[in-house]
Amino acid sequence: MQMNHETDGRNRAETVRLYPGIHISFYSLTAETESFPIYDGHSEQILEINYCRAGRIGWIRKNGSSVYLGPKDFSLHTMQAYADSRRTLPNGFYDGMTLRIDLQELISHPPEPLEDAEVVGTLLYEKFCRSAAFPSFAGNRETEAIFSFFYNQPPALQLSYQKIKILELLLYLCRPDHITERRLTEYQSEQVEIVHKIHEQLAQSLDQRVTIEALSKQYLMNPTTLKAVFKSVYGNSIAAHMKEHRMEEAARLLTETDRSIAEIALAVGYDSQSKFSAAFKSCFHMLPKEYRKNR
């Protein structure tokens, strides 16, 4: 087993060679820095499969489109297709993995279990590498059963599991009935930039409640599109996502200040202290007063 570890303080990576031409990299990212790239090549013969385990990750392409992966989502593309893209972590962290498959090597020297399926490398190239597309999919029960086994196995068995599961994944992707209607939607980068501005505005004004209709008029974006793009980027509705921000800020204020609970409720957009307490308890499983006491 060949293993390589990299870190820059806030980001970590571990790469393992599974077969000749097939490598798996595990990533834990918390900083949006291009000095720690996921992509380090431009080959159209290298197929990359990205799987998001936790957090969110997005790519902004030079052609103006953007795509985002959330937990259990996965994507496929050549290294060349996304060599000039910009990576973004909309929620501030990402935990996932990337499989890199040299299709020429796979065609010429397939792992022994795939020797009877000589078309695997060719099929993968035809399906996912002939165009500059970036097909991305919402995970399902079958894909999650494959991807989840790459993690949390007994150390003595982990590499064997990974070697088996990569072969199962490649065969799954070659199947004629491989599900495509679960594809994730790509959005134009202009729309994504607007949503980023909306997010920044809302995050800086937690004491205010702004309706989707008002945001739609302010940013000249259709309400339905606004909601769809926001959920694609941040993984949740505007209301649910901002509730998380409000509760995180409330927890900080409870811990770091002596402000009253009523004042904190107002600071994060709640006129009613009882509604604030109920919302806080739904997130932290205790009332604000208990949270402050325990901290």
Image: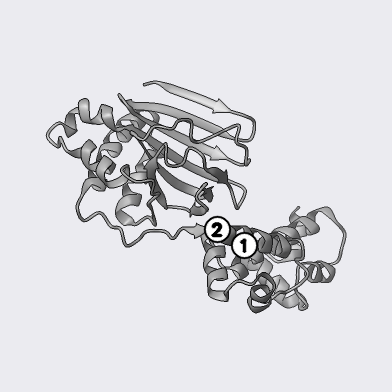
Q: Quadrant of residue 199?
A: bottom right
Residue displayed at 48% across by 53% down: 67
Q: Callout 2, which amino acid?
A: Val
Query: Which residue: 57% across, 33% down?
Result: 36
Q: Are marks 2 and 1 in contact (CB under 8 Å)?
A: yes
Residue denoted by label 2: 233
Give the residue at mark 1: 195
Q: Residue at x 39, y 57 (%)?
A: 138
In the picture, measured across the screen, residue 230 lies left or right of residue 110, that is right
Q: Could you tell me which secondary element the residue under label 2 belongs to? A: helix
State the image coordinates of residue 160 (x, y, percent, origin top left).
30, 30
Residue 285 visible from this viewpoint: no
Q: Earlier in the sequence, mark 2 or mark 1?
A: 1
Task: Describe residue 85's horizontal placement relative to residue 31 as left or right.
Answer: left
The one nearer the camera, 103 or 199, is: 103
Q: Amino acid at mark 1?
A: Val
Q: Classify 10 Å Cα crowding around label 2: few (below 14), some (14-19), many (20 and above).
A: many
Residue drawn at x 42%, y 45% as measured from the top left? 51
**Of the pair 14 and 132, the residue shown nearer to us:** 132
